[in-house]
Image (cartoon, rainbow, N blue to C red):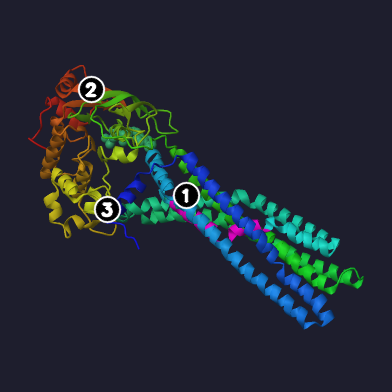
Amino acid sequence: MQFRSKSAKSTMTARRETRPALDAPTLIREARFTFVRGLTWAGIVSGFINVLQLTVPLFMLQVHDRVINSQSIDTLKLLLIIAVGAIILYGILDFIRAMTFQEMAKSLLRRLNLPAIAAAMSVSMEKGSTPGTQVLRDLADLRTFINGNTIGAPLEALWSPIFLGVMFALHPFYGLAGVIGVIMLIGLSLLGDLLSRRITKEASDANLRNIADIGSAIPHAEAIEGMGMMPALAMRWRAAQHHTTELLDISNARGKGMYSLTRSLRYGLQVGVLAMGAALVIKGETSPGAMIGGTVIMGRLLLPFDNVTRDWRGWVNALSAWRRIRDILEQRQSEREVAPTPRCEGPLVVDNLVYAVSGNNVPVLKGISFDINPGEILGIIGPSAAGKSTLSRVLIGAAKPTAGGVYLDGHSTYLWERGSFGDMVGYLPQSVSLLNGTIRENIGRMRDADPRKVIDAARAAGVHEMIGRLPLGYDTPIGSGRYTLSGGQKQRIALARALYGWPRLLVLDEPNANLDAEGEASLIRAIRAASENGAMVVLIAHRQSIMRYAHKLLVLQEGRVKQFGERTDVVQALSDPGTDVKSLPDSNRKYVANGGKLENGGAA
Ligand SMILES: Nc1ncnc2c1ncn2[C@@H]1O[C@H](COP(=O)(O)OP(=O)(O)OP(=O)(O)O)[C@@H](O)[C@H]1O
């Protein structure tokens, strides 16, 4: 027996991780192919299963017509052996079909899981919506559908010609009755679909909206509880749920009504066929065995159509889930590169950048151009809603430029393959979010990170000692239901995460918002060290104290660059009476009025 060494294993894992991701059309094509291939194979097996399902009626017919008439035990024994063999084969094939579906679900989910979740995340980021949890539900629904009984019914219905053939062989009247029965059941299924399709879609959409609404409120439980918002929210949810329940009830009632009708029709048809068979026996046109066998075969023939009427909703729901997954994959439209790009040393150039949120004609960023060289610190200031945070998201390639672009060493930051781009970038978003995991995992960006690099980043952010005082140090678990960090602690650990691996580009959005004087001093040390190391630092801050360390300043106003240049030049330009400094927030105004000097010797 061979054992792989730990390093060999990790090399293999690394290779697997660096395998280029497939683009959306290829993924969708592969998923469809997997589904159709699985369904075709299961369909073929279903054909044999259907033939074997004739065992019982044919056995009945033979026993009645041959054994009872001939009184031959040997014939009975032979028939019994054949029937038992056929039943065993039926069991084996049924199991093979179930395994085919299981493999199909596994293979589909293996292909779709990560790309769909990643796509949902990037769509959430770009559109500010939350399809992330929905896509997880859709993937789970797809798996349940494929592994369940629902998927098999239409496959069995496909083989109905076999049963019809046997019925025609028994007597043309049986065949005719079978054809009429199948047409009636298909007609009822289509009518049921027509009556319920719209309402079922409305009910399902309303249900998804409710789940998303309630889900989005859960992270704000503190504010809801603290400000007594729960009764008002409960009333809104109750009203929305009442509406959804009404729609679901209507849709259910229609579906159930159709199913009851279908089932009654099936029983009625079976009784009719039995009566017809009896009449044929009396007239001497068929045997009593054919009468019983024909009735049983009629039941088998109609059953899959009965099941299709009952289960069509499962197919509709699975189809909707698949469409949502496919849309998410297509929306992501990863034009991003799949091959990693090596670390680069060049400048950051923003060229005539326009960014508009999809569906909104007025861009947030309107033709922004500037550049930063290695080692430079750029401070971005401007009033609220000027587009500073949006600009930071476009800089790191989290949002796609509508026109123009952001280039790092001449390479679009949006198109850059994410893994290799992440190795060069550190980002501290305005609303700090740490992930469920240990401090070490968070700083190491959830990888199997080198502990020395984690400690280096923590030291650079000035949090190494603070982490040492936590209950389990770097192994302290944080996130929901675990150790709770203060706002300032979270911000400083997020800064360490941004500094991890000495990034080439560091984008910090309000990094000092929650910091005390000591925290801010550490932040300044970190920024300066990064700059001395050759990193480009983009700093967005309302608090003026930190801007004195910027080499360049950019004043953003209503999505346009109002001023950009060396800090002293910009400060000079803004101090000019002709410059509309009033539009700047208080902190920036004071900063400009002070000629770029700090007030109170430190934080504002
Ligand atoms: N996903 C989005 N959908 C709709 N509007 C958006 C979206 N993202 C940003 N905006 C709009 O763009 C504008 C700029 O927002 P942004 O958060 O970039 O401002 P900011 O300068 O960072 O403000 P602040 O200093 O208050 O943080 C705002 O009017 C905001 O409503």
Q: Which mark is residue 209?
A: 1
> Which of the four quarters of the rendered structure image does ligand 1 lie in?
top left
SS at circle 1 = helix
Nearer-the-camera pick, 43 or 486: 43
Look at the image and tell me whether residue 250 can be seen. Answer: no
Distance of mark 2 from mark 1, alpha carbons?
44 Å
Which residue appears at 22% of the width and 56% of the height? 484
Q: Earlier in the sequence, mark 3 or mark 1?
A: 3
Q: Which mark is residue 313?
A: none
Which residue appears at 46% of the width and 48% of the height? 112
Query: Which amino acid lies under the numbered mark 1 shown in the image of this protein?
Result: Arg
The magenta stretch is 134-156
> Measured along the vertical axis of the image, is residue 156 above or below residue 79?
above
Circles 2, 3 touching at the beta carbon (< 8 Å): no
Q: Which residue is mark 2?
A: 564
SS at circle 2 = strand
- Main SS of residues in magenta: helix
Q: Is residue 129 magenta?
A: no
Nearer-the-camera pick, 424 or 130: 424
Which residue appears at 74% of the width and 73% of the height? 59
SS at circle 3 = helix
**Quadrant in which residue 343 is drawn:** top left
Q: Quadrant of the C terminus?
A: top left
Pair 2/3: label in front: 3
Query: Which amino acid lies under the numbered mark 3 shown in the image of this protein?
Result: Ser
Residue 476: give x, y in percent of width and height: 21, 57
Q: Which mark is residue 7?
A: 3
- Mark 3 Cα within 10 Å, few/some/many (few <14, many 20+)? few
